Image: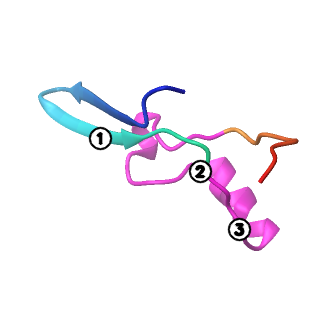
Amino acid sequence: MSEKYCKVIYKDVIIKGWMGVYILKGDPVLLKIAYDAGLGSKNSQGFGCFEILEGLKR
């Protein structure tokens, strides 16, 4: 991904978001909830979703 910052205008409201590769650590039950519900404050608008990437080198 070339852009780490994303700005969307929806109904005259500016919604800012950040794109990138992040490492999440924690209780597997809580990580499952984060996966199901999304991360952030605009989840009901479809923001905050993420995918799990396998095989990345640290």
Q: Is residue 35 left or right of residue 49?
A: right
The residue depicted at 45 percent of the width and 38 percent of the height is 47
Nearer-N-terminus badge (2/3) = 3
Residue 36 lies within the magenta run: yes
Disc 1 on helix, strand or loop?
Answer: strand
In front: 5, or 42? 5
Which circle, 3 or 1, is nearer the viewer?
A: 1
Nearer-N-terminus badge (1/2) = 1
Query: Callout 3: 10 Å neighbours few (<14), some, many (20+)?
Result: few
Query: Callout 2: 10 Å neighbours few (<14), some, many (20+)?
Result: some
Q: Position of residue 8 (x, y in %)?
A: 28, 28
Q: Position of residue 41 (x, y in %)?
A: 38, 53
The residue depicted at 17 percent of the width and 26 percent of the height is 11
Q: Which residue is mark 2?
A: 37
Relative height, residue 33 to residue 38 (above, below)? below
Q: Position of residue 49 (x, y in %)?
A: 57, 40
Between the C-alphas of marks 3 and 1, the distance is 25 Å
Which circle, 1 or 2, is nearer the viewer?
A: 1
The residue depicted at 68 percent of the width and 50 percent of the height is 35
In which image quadrant can residue 18 be found? Answer: top left
Disc 2 on helix, strand or loop?
Answer: helix
Q: Quadrant of the C terminus?
A: bottom right
Nearer-N-terminus badge (3/1) = 1
Q: Which residue is mark 3?
A: 30
Q: Is residue 36 left or right of residue 47?
A: right
In which image quadrant can residue 12 be found? Answer: top left
Query: Callout 1: 10 Å neighbours few (<14), some, many (20+)?
Result: few
Q: Which residue is mark 1?
A: 16
Magenta-tinted stretch:
22-50
